[in-house]
Amino acid sequence: MVKQIRNKRPGMVDVGDKNVTHRVARARALVDLPPPVARQLRGDELISRKGPVFQTAVVAGIMAAKRTSAIIPLCHPLGIEDCKIDIRVVRRRQVVIECSVSMHGKTGVEMEALTGAVAAALTIYDMCKGLSHDIVIHDVRLLEKHGGKSDYVRA
């Protein structure tokens, strides 16, 4: 039986009493490229009419991770210390995007890592939709997080 909560209002979690620790999170998103897009690959480079796709996606992912609190309600604004986006092509038709975020703070950076990975994936879609709308973004997930009360590593 699911317990119902009535008259509950949204609110931020109070992190005032938490200890500052080193927080790290890594997330992934997969992008499947249809043949018209995959044919434009030159090694690990993809160029569309809008320009260099993967390089632009890296910038978009970092920018989104830094602004997660403006996108996701109730997320704390964080002073991210490091954000890296890694994009690689596998099996010629799939792109793997990983976003790693770290900082010292009172709350985790999982949402920032997830947001960065998704924004990079959406940027690939946007820059390649002129070639095909059959691009599929999927399997967005947290791979690991460290710091705070508990660590997590996807098995």
Image (spheres, rainbow, N blue to C red):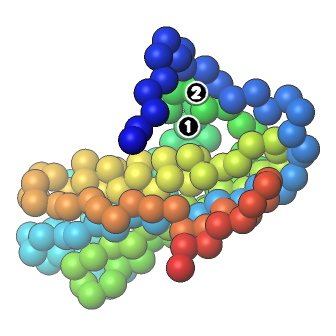
Q: Position of residue 137 (x, y in %)?
A: 27, 59
Q: Position of residue 148 (x, y in %)?
A: 79, 54
* Amino acid, disc 1: Thr
Q: Residue at x 25, y 48 (%)?
A: 126
Q: Position of residue 80 (x, y in %)?
A: 72, 46
Reading the chain from its start, which is encountered first: label 1 or label 2? 1
Q: Which secondary structure lies at badge 1?
A: helix
- Marks 1/2: CA distance? 10 Å
Q: Which secondary structure lies at badge 2?
A: loop
Picture disc at residue 74: 2
Vertical arrangement, residue 101 with respect to residue 36, above or below? above
The quadrant the N terminus occupies is top left
Residue farthest along the bottom direction in this orientation = 91
Q: Nearer the viewer, residue 57 or 139?
A: 139
Picture disc at residue 68: 1
Residue 50 in sight from this viewpoint: no
* Amino acid, disc 2: Leu
Q: Position of residue 23 (x, y in %)?
A: 77, 55
Vertical arrangement, residue 63 with respect to residue 120, above or below? above
Mark 2 nearby-residue class (10 Å; few <14, some 14–19, many ≥20): few
Q: Residue at x 54, y 73 (%)?
A: 154
Q: Is residue 91 left or right of residue 155?
A: left
Q: Is residue 115 left or right of residue 149?
A: left
